[in-house]
Image: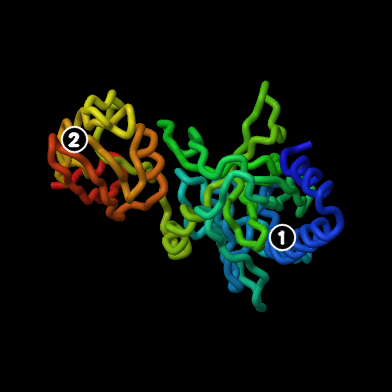
């Protein structure tokens, strides 16, 4: 029994029928709406594959890169069993996202992207997918953590960090690329990974989804045909967490710049060795991971505001994000 069900039973004990009826109606509405837009995706020469969902009535389908890969011919099956030939028009390997296009003579059912930043631990969510070939399987759970830091290895030769939604809604092989939905029927995540134990690729109550606020940043680029073979962004600075020495400090540690690579984004922004970083985009910086996760939530070319202290002086730097290794003159 997962935590969502346990909580539900506890609430039902206090508020029996009205709550159950309203929750069940809400779940039916979410599934009826989003289920029509959820599709099965497989390579033309394979019997099974993964999941995707239609995001526009003219046939743009979002899924995982590891489901669609870089194929020019995919089989996309709708809920009404109609099959279309799909082709990958854009992808982002680092975030495991792919955009597939299908052509239909009539408008298709579609779902909209919601605000993953509004999720909290305990938020109710629904996952729809095709685990082990069982098409349009629905599972229900909660958000276990709205921004878990996930060590991803699927995209590049070097591991990097990605903020993901952790959920206990059942996710199994075949769910990949499917929607994680809030109770308004909006997509708040793209189901992408699970934790495995002892080599068993089965649901353990630890599923992970790419948050919709990250997906939205890449969406227009993917629809326009952009292909990100490697999109690990860098700052060009190396940080250390050190004890904060001044009296009356609100926190015990501070994040200090230890090294800056020449011609890197940090160098161009005017940051220097010894600077104490305070915030990025208004969010507190307490560990190097805090910086990595925030950077991974944005796209190349975006400018992020960093507030810092240099000795007794407060400063502000504007950091322009670039792919790892890109240098500035």
Tag shown at residue 251: none
Observer-nearest residue: 279 or 139? 279
The outermost residue toward the top is 198
Q: Is residue 226 above or below residue 108?
A: above
Observer-nearest residue: 280 or 263? 280
Query: Which numbered disc flags the more N-terminal residue, 1 or 2?
Result: 1
The outermost residue toward the bottom is 106
Q: Is residue 170 above or below residue 82?
A: above
Q: What residue is pinned by disc 2? A: 275
The x and y percentages for residue 102 are: 60, 66
Instruction: Identify the residue at image location x=75%, y=38%.
Output: 2
The outermost residue toward the right is 17
The x and y percentages for residue 165 are: 56, 44
Observer-nearest residue: 43 or 180? 180
Instruction: Identify the residue at image location x=47%, y=64%.
Output: 223
Q: Is residue 245 left or right of residue 27?
A: left
Q: What residue is pinned by disc 1? A: 77
Asked if one can make out residue 153 in the rendered structure from this viewpoint, the answer is no
Which quadrant, please, contains the N terminus?
A: top right
Asked if one can make out residue 155 in the rendered structure from this viewpoint, the answer is yes
Instruction: Identify the residue at image location x=39%, y=34%.
Output: 289
Instruction: Identify the residue at image location x=37%, y=42%.
Output: 232
Q: Is residue 153 left or right of residue 303?
A: right
The x and y percentages for residue 226 are: 41, 58
Total of numbered circles in the picture? Answer: 2
Image marks 1 and 2: residues in contact by CB distance under 8 Å? no
Between marks 1 and 2, how big is the CA–CA gap? 54 Å
Circle 1 — which element?
strand
The x and y percentages for residue 74 are: 63, 56
């Amino acid at each position: 029994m997962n935590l969502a069900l346990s909580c539900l039973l506890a609430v039902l004990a206090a508020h029996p029928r009205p709550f159950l009826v309203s929750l069940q109606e809400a779940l039916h509405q979410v599934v009826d709406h989003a289920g029509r837009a959820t599709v099965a995706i497989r390579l033309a020469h394979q019997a099974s594959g993964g999941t995707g969902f239609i995001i526009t009535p003219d046939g743009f389908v979002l899924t995982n890169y590891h489901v669609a890969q870089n194929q020019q011919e995919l089989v996309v099956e709708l809920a009404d069993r109609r099959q279309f030939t799909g082709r990958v028009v854009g992808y982002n390997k680092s975030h495991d996202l792919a955009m597939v296009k299908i052509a239909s003579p009539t408008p298709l059912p579609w779902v909209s992207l919601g605000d993953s930043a509004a999720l909290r631990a305990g938020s109710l969510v629904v996952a729809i997918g095709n685990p082990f070939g069982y098409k349009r399987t629905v599972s229900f759970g909660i958000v276990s953590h709205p921004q878990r830091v996930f060590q991803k290895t699927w995209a590049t030769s070097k591991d990097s960090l990605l903020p993901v939604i952790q959920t206990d809604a059942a996710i199994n092989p075949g769910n990949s690329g499917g929607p994680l939905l809030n109770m308004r029927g909006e997509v708040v995540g793209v189901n992408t990974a699970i934790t495995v134990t002892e080599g068993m690729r089965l649901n353990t109550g630890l599923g992970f989804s790419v948050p919709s606020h990250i997906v939205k940043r890449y969406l227009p680029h993917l629809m326009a045909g952009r292909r990100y073979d490697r999109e690990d962004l860098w700052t060009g600075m190396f940080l250390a967490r050190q004890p904060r020495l001044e009296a009356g400090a609100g926190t015990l540690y501070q994040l200090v710049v230890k090294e800056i690579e020449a011609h890197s984004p940090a160098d161009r922004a005017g940051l220097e060795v010894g600077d104490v970083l305070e915030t990025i985009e208004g969010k507190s910086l307490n560990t190097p991971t805090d910086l990595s996760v925030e950077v991974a939530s944005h796209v190349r070319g975006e400018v992020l505001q960093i507030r810092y202290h240099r000795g007794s002086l407060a400063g502000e730097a504007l950091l322009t994000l670039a792919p790892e290794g890109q240098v500035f003159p």
